[in-house]
């Protein structure tokens, strides 16, 4: 079993989604067992944050952004899906958009957006994206199913940066995947606290989701597909001679993160380190869908 993750820029446009599905179809046709995690479409999370803040400020411009959000997902579904697949997706999107619209209007009325409410607002990006893509995969002949990560990733109520209850989460992951053999298409970034309250996992949350799944499933590898050139020795915007590293240890990866290595999020490494499996297969997604590989290897101590 492998866990794959695709970021927002990889699914920002319908043609990119089609490219991702071609990649996944190759895995499926080879008979590989895998689950796949998706972020929201590129730019959507920032837009949702802005909607919530504008609504809280009493600025009616939030409604324009909400309309753009809704139309973008409807347009993507219409461009990618046909027939019964489109017929299944559009009503679900319309329901999601109605709920989100009402939520934002409530924020507008009370002039306040709490961290708890903002987490719920942000969840609509990942939920829309993964739901649409799961049906694109099914249309392409992949036996896929949509999985809202709130069903399996349980957290505390630290909204905005929730802490995972790994004992409960690992048990739920194992049980769910045992009972649902389809290729699971999972929402990144989100979880659920006691009472079903929606939480988010913080910066790098979708990568973290992939690592959580990998740990829970004892995956052979986690593959993070992205459009950046691997892990660099420094921020290339500040250091002209920065270059990409071909491999590094977990310890090195975690040490670099506080110094600006934005492709690394320390909590993402931790489940892999605890489980002692191979992490990460770091990949640069190029326009022609070829990939360059970057590996983060366990330290010798982690393999003992």
Image (spheres, rainbow, N blue to C red):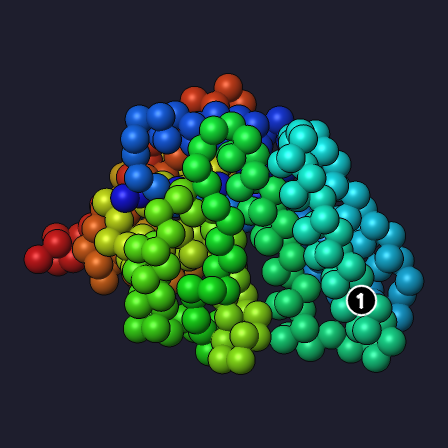
Residue at the extreme left of the image, as rendered = 304
Point out residue 178 in the picture as x, y percentages from the top left corner.
30, 55
Say whether residue 255 is visible.
no
- Residue at x 30%, y 67% (from the top left corner): 171
**On screen, 183 above or below 16?**
below
Q: Quadrant of residue 80?
A: top right
Nearest the camera: 99 or 271? 99
Q: Is residue 243 left or right of residue 10?
A: left
Q: Is residue 258 left or right of residue 47?
A: left
Q: Camera-side residue: 39 or 257?
A: 39
Residue displayed at 51% across by 49% down:
146
The location of residue 301, given as percent across then percent down, is 12, 58
Q: Nearer the viewer, residue 196 or 108?
A: 196
Q: Residue placed farthest to the front in the image?
A: 84
Q: Which residue is mark 1?
A: 102
Residue 126: image x %, image y %?
Answer: 59, 52
Mark 1 secondary-structure assignment: helix
């Amino acid at each position: 079993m492998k866990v794959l993750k695709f970021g927002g820029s990889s699914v920002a446009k319908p043609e990119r989604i089609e490219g991702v599905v071609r990649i996944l179809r190759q895995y499926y046709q080879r008979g590989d067992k895998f689950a796949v995690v998706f972020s929201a479409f590129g730019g959507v999370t920032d837009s949702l944050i802005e909607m919530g803040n504008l609504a809280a400020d009493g600025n009616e411009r939030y409604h324009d952004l909400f309309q753009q959000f809704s139309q973008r997902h409807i347009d993507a579904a219409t461009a990618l899906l046909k027939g019964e697949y489109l017929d299944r997706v559009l009503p679900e999107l319309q329901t999601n958009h109605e709920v989100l619209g009402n939520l934002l209007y409530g924020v507008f009325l009370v002039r306040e957006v709490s961290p708890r409410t903002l987490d719920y607002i942000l969840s609509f990006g990942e939920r829309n994206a993964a739901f649409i893509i799961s049906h694109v995969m099914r249309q392409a002949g992949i036996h896929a199913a949509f999985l809202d990560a709130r069903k399996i990733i349980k957290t505390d109520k630290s909204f905005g940066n929730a802490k995972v209850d790994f004992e409960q989460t690992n048990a739920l992951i194992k049980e769910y995947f045992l009972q649902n053999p389809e290729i699971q298409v999972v929402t990144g970034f989100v979880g659920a606290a006691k009472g079903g309250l929606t939480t988010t996992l913080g910066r790098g949350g979708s990568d973290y989701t992939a690592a959580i799944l990998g740990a829970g499933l004892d995956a052979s590898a986690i593959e993070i597909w992205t459009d950046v050139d691997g892990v660099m020795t420094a921020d290339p915007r500040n250091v002209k001679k920065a270059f990409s590293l071909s491999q590094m240890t977990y310890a090195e990866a975690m040490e670099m993160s506080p110094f600006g290595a934005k492709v690394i999020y320390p909590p993402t490494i931790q489940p892999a380190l605890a489980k002692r499996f191979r992490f990460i297969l770091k990949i640069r997604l190029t326009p022609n869908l070829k990939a360059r590989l970057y590996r983060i290897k366990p330290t010798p101590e982690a393999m003992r």
